[in-house]
Amino acid sequence: MFASLLVLSASVAYDSHLPPLIQWQGQSNELMQQEGPLTTDFELSSGEISPNYADTMAFVDRLVAANPTQFKSQTIGYSNSKRAIKMLIASEQGFFEAGQMANSTKPTIFIQAGIHSGEIDGKDAMFMLLRDIATGKRRDILKKVNILFIPILNVDGHERSSVFNRINQRGPIKMGFRTNANNLNLNRDFTKLDTPEVRSVLKVINAYNPNLYIDVHVTDGADYQYDVTYGYNPVFASESPAVSDTLNQFFKPMIDEELTSQGHIPGPLVFTMDKRDFKKGLAGWVATPRFSNGWGDLKSLPTILVENHSLKPYKQRVLGTYVFLDGAINALSTYSHELSNAVKKEQEFVPKQLIVKRGYAKQADTIEFKGIAYASSMSELSGQNEVNYLGKKLDYSNLPIYWQKEVLDTVEVPKAFFIPPVYSDIIEKLKLHGVSVNKLEGANTQPLKMAKVSDYTFDKAPFEGRFRVSASFEYIPAINVDLDGWYQVNTQQKSGELAAHLLHPEAPDSFFAWGEFNTIFQRTEYMENYALIPYARQMLKDNPKLALVFDKKINNDKEFAKDAAARLNWLYEHSPFYDQAYLKYPILMSFEEKVVIADQKDKEI
């Protein structure tokens, strides 16, 4: 107790560098209890503390013991440090198995907390809500929905706990670290699947097929009045626009009304164009599939990203999360039919083109925005003007907002991709993504195309443990390819659009972009001049057209003419000895209207 008081008093000093607060007193304060069964550590500390991993898992066990007919705890995976990742399943009828829940008449909501474990609001909010279910205060909840809840996804980062982990966040007093034990950001891993934590999430989604996925975070950035901001890819930029439109029309009004009635201020998920000059406007973000909500958008899985405001006190944020989740549950129960229809519509549609690059609109829209007044002054430390937020309300009536509306690049969606059997790890990842894959056997003939790298650039520094690569391609016919034992991925399937983003080399979060195929940039066989020169002399003699091209290149390119190594390498490239796999993306593509396969047996994996 004494140690806790020391930490509590220390927190005052650690908060002193943050901007002044606008005092808050919402009706949701009444959700807290100070005594009685299953009072949380958060409540016992008056909203200052979040329990450590051991105490969190113990509280999960207490919840299950208090309501074993409706609650069950399940280990869904382990971190690389061998900590168990627990999920609590809640069902009125005790439908804990995936098949049972799939046959339930109620929709299923999947709530994930602690993907960034310093941003742990969702854990303590859901513990309060589940306690209220277990003790009978909220019997209505399980009459509406089934619940899947991960209290801590980043279990290793959660235990790298400190009062110094997030300089611009008010509480909890001790909080976890952003990345996992391998220093990987789990919310950048939804396509490449390097982490056991995110692989566990995808296994849950594949098994239980939830109707709504909620990922709870705490934002960084500017100060403003909103305490609970949330969002999903906007309709104009969504890969599942019918789903986005349904969330807009039916879910958002109900959630916002619930938050407002409890004294919270819901706001849009936006960022600033310039952190030092708020008046330059807001940036409207479109998530790519490396993020949970971008991946969910491609998967046609309705996904809401919650970003509570980091400068608001922990107590206020947790209570706001409770109210948000309560509102989302009510909305899902009320509008599950509309949402299911939107999902079905999107799963049946695969576009002919993928947008692989977006830019901010040159012309801004405007938005009413509840900001915080600020002053700007020269900092002796940074040597530039810096913002000082003043803790006073400032409402903007026509603040510019720039959305990523401009389409900068698109690619054609193949009818099918063909993957060599050597890439078994890619096949396993596709299965985790819920993509259907067929194995080909026997003699196969296909009119296929190959992507040949014409230019490429590697990132200068690693990102998420990988050196990402960007490239331009030319698409050429693939000649004499024996597809026996290869894997075929058709894009005309429920996860077809996601498959296209994963497998098309020009997609920004594809396996190729994340460096899964970096070995194609290696040359492992070379030539000796004493062997190449006599061979090349005969090759040019036998092929006058090639000799003419070589002569023209010497005459028109002075640098080439003076570079002996370049000349010999050109000749080597045009010989049959040259590595035919060099700079060639090994996954082939079919763009035909109908794929004709002779003498084939398909095996569903």
Image: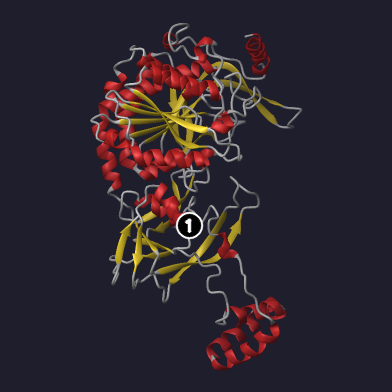
Above or below, 87 relative to 577: above
**Residue 355 visible in the snapshot:** no
Does 229 sit left or right of 18 as displayed?
Answer: left
- Relative to the observer, which residue lies in front, 121 or 235? 121
Name the residue located 42 percent from the left edge and 58 percent from the top edge: 411
Q: Is residue 451 visible?
A: yes
Which residue is at the far top?
35
Query: What is the count of numbered marks?
Result: 1
Q: Residue at x 40, y 50 (%)?
A: 431
Secondary structure of the residue carrying tag 1 is: loop
Foreground residue, 55 or 364? 55
Q: Is residue 220 above or below residue 319?
A: below
Q: Position of residue 206 (x, y in %)?
A: 36, 42
Of 212 and 261, the residue lying toward us: 212
Quadrant housing residue 443: bottom left
Where does label 1 land, which residue? Answer: 506
What residue appears at the point 44 percent right and 52 percent down from the top-left corner?
428
How many C-alpha atoms fall within 10 Å of the one at disc 1: few (<14), some, or many (≥20)?
Answer: many
Q: Is residue 105 above or below residue 559?
A: above
Kind of residue sitting beneath label 1: Glu
Q: Quadrant of the N terminus?
A: top right
Quadrant where the C terminus sits is bottom left
Q: Quick one: 591 or 393, which is closer to the camera?
A: 591
Q: On the rendered structure, is 358 left or right of 93?
A: right
Figure check: 516 above or below 400: below
Q: Position of residue 165 (x, y in %)?
A: 63, 27
Q: How is the image coloured?
A: secondary structure
Q: Position of residue 303 (x, y in %)?
A: 39, 35
Q: Locate residue 15, reporting x and y percent.
A: 64, 17
